[in-house]
Image (tube, helix red, strand yellow):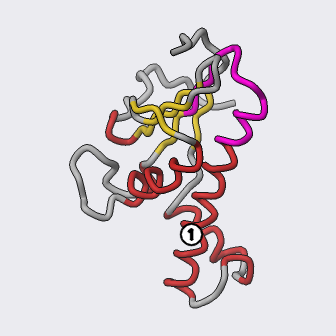
Amino acid sequence: MLPYDPSPPSAISDRNVFNILVNADNAVMSEGNITQPEKLERSLEEFILNFLKQKHLPLMPSSAIISLKCGRGTSYERYIEVFNVLKKTYNKLWENSSISRFGKLYDMLLKRNHNAIRSEIPLLISQAGSTDLASH
């Protein structure tokens, strides 16, 4: 059994959270802007990697959290479509990191190297339960 810790959970800075909302009409919003799922990949990469070291984005990829919230009426197909974009983006980032660090495709790496890449660029997706997101 873990010891009791009365301290409140640490707050997560807004700069570390990329918000994606899918409403009951299957409209996708990313960071407050209506978008198409296929256009999320580039925005996600820029957010996670923060190449330009912008102050409103995570300091490092290990701090980046993707928040995915869907409305009660969101179709399962749309949810899967958006989730697949998230997974595809991370797969691409892992592949690029693998090639630059080890000179090999991600699938060709030893497990310890997989772990090294995934600790540097962890797949952190927060999925909230269905909510009453208004249709647009």
Image coordinates of residue 135 in percent, x first then y, are 56, 13
Percent x, y for residue 66? 51, 41
Quadrant of image for the N terminus? top right
Q: Residue at x 39, y 56 (%)?
A: 46
Q: Secondary structure at mark 1?
A: helix
Which residue is found at the position 31% from the left and 64% from the top? Answer: 51
Quadrant of res 18: top left
112 or 93, which is in the foreground?
93
Residue tagged by mark 1?
117
Task: Identify residue type, mark 1.
Answer: Ile
Say which of 95 and 10 sits in front.
Answer: 95
Query: Magenta includes 69?
Result: yes
Mark 1 crowdedness (10 Å alpha carbons): few <14, some 14-19, many ≥20: some
Where residue 71 sits in the image (x, y, percent)?
63, 17
Q: Compared with residue 72, is residue 19 higher up or lower down, i.e. above or below?
A: below
Residue 67: give x, y in percent of width and height.
52, 34
Q: Residue at x 70, y 81 (%)?
A: 109
123 over 99 or under it: above or below: above
Magenta range: 68-82
Residues 113 and 132: in front is 132
Q: Residue, x 48% and y 42% (percent of image)?
A: 65
Answer left or right for 63 relative to 59. Answer: right
Residue with the most extreme bottom position: 103
Magenta stretch: residue 130 in it?
A: no
Residue lying farthest to the left in this orientation = 55
